Each structure stands twice: as structure tokens, then as C-alpha cells.
Image (cartoon, coloured by chain):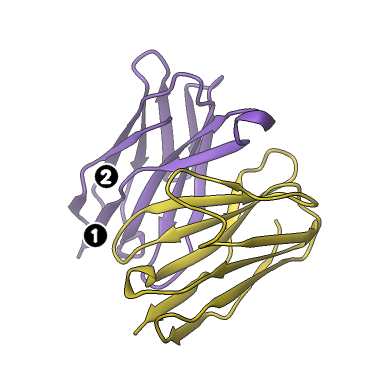
Amino acid sequence: SAVISQKPSRDICQRGTSLTIQCQVDSQVTMMFWYRQQPGQSLTLIATANQGSEATYESGFVIDKFPISRPNLTFSTLTVSNMSPEDSSIYLCSVELQGARGYTFGSGTRLTVV
Amino acid sequence: GENVEQHPSTLSVQEGDSAVIKCTYSDSASNYFPWYKQELGKRPQLIIDIRSNVGEKKDQRIAVTLNKTAKHFSLHITETQPEDSAVYFCAALLSRGLTGGGNKLTFGTGTQLKVEL
């Protein structure tokens, strides 16, 4: 099973600033995803990080707010831009495991915007 | 798009009893249904999954059933233990194709399971 390292694990940020979250996988994966989990809520897909091309965003999420990079098959970043308190959430990276073995998650980044 | 409903939102059982969590999905094209366990402050962990060509799957005390006709699937935990206490999420995977946005995993709203001694 792939090991996903996500950092930072948590951060407290001032409103109006940006935070970049990194996701590193110990093996090459085709599909990488970014999710948001608001306090006490379920997981919502933000976007699919595509290697070598622009990310595919879900309804309600836009590139200007959540720019994503995927320079290779083991690494991706999510930036939360111009943050407001409403962006306070846990952000999770996810990958599709090889051999149709499902989807696994990184440990998450707990973001608090003050 | 896909919509996944999950019930109950909270479930309290006595240690040793069984627990059942139910989910329904809306898109008949969904073809993969995983279940995740999330302990407080931790990442969701895949505990069992089922594909649309299978009706039931079991792994020790955990089983999942799928009824494609009714578009619902359930998680069954037998002989519950205090360490089973967590939030459980069901999910449904819709393969939308490359031009449709790729694979999308839609999650249910979660069930807080509490196993009491």
C-alpha cells in the first residue's frame, strides 16, 4: 500500500494569506486527489490533480482559490489562497492504489484561519 | 452527479452486539463502494470495499452487502468492541471518463458509532 506524507500537519494562518500543502507518495500513482473535510463533516472532493496538465475542479471550487500543481507521479501541492475563516478545515490528499485496491488518504492538514 | 445518503448519523450499541450502517446512492453507474473508518484526529482508513459485480463481501467481523437494484449498500459489524468506536463513512465511485472529470468518490455524511461497555 502507498505511503502518503502530507505537510504541514497543521497551521494557523492570518486571513488574506495563502498556504501551500504538500503531498508526497512513496510510489508512482496515476490518480491524486484533494479533499476538504470541514469540522464534524464528511469529505468533499476539491479537485483531481492531473500530472502534466491543469487540475480538474469540482463544482464550487475554482483554480484561483485552490491552485494545484502535479509536476510528477509522486508529488502534488494544493494552495489555499486569500484565506478567510470559512477556509478552516482539514485538507486531505488521496491516491488511487495500483491494482484496483481502492483509495487511501494522507494524514491531512488541519488549517485554522484567524 | 452522484448523491450518497447514510443512516443513522449516530449509533450506540453494547459491546458484543452487531452494528449496521446503511447507505443509498443515486447514480446506477457507480461501480465501487468503499467503507472508511475515521478515528478522532486521524485520517480515514479503508476497512472494506465491494464492487458492483459482487453482492456480499466479508472480512472477519466486518461484512458489506450491495443491492444494485435498490441502489443501497450496508456495513455490518459483528461482535462489536470498544475499539470499533469511530466515525464510519460510506462512499460511491462514479467513473466519469477523462472528458467528464475522471473518477469521483462521493462520500456519505458519516455515522458516529459508539460501542459501550
**Chain to which mark 2 belongs:** B
Query: Label 2, on which residue?
Result: B19
- Is there CB contact under 8 Å for labels 2 and 1? yes
Q: State the image quarter where residue B19 is shown.
A: top left
Side of B39 relative to A69 (left or right): left
**Chain to which mark 1 belongs:** B
Task: State the image coordinates of residue B25 (x, y, percent, origin top left).
Answer: 37, 28
Task: State the image coordinates of residue A72 (x, y, percent, origin top left).
Answer: 82, 59
Query: Label 1, on which residue?
Result: B115
* Pick the front one: B11 or B7: B7
At x 63%, y 36%, the residue is: B102
Indicate the chain coloured yellow by its letter: A
- Quarter of the picture holding the N terminus of chain B: top left
Indicate the chain coloured purple by its letter: B
User: Label 1: how many residues lie within 10 Å, few (<14), some (14-19) or many (20+)?
Assistant: many
Q: Secondary structure at mark 1?
A: strand
Q: Amino acid at mark 1?
A: Val
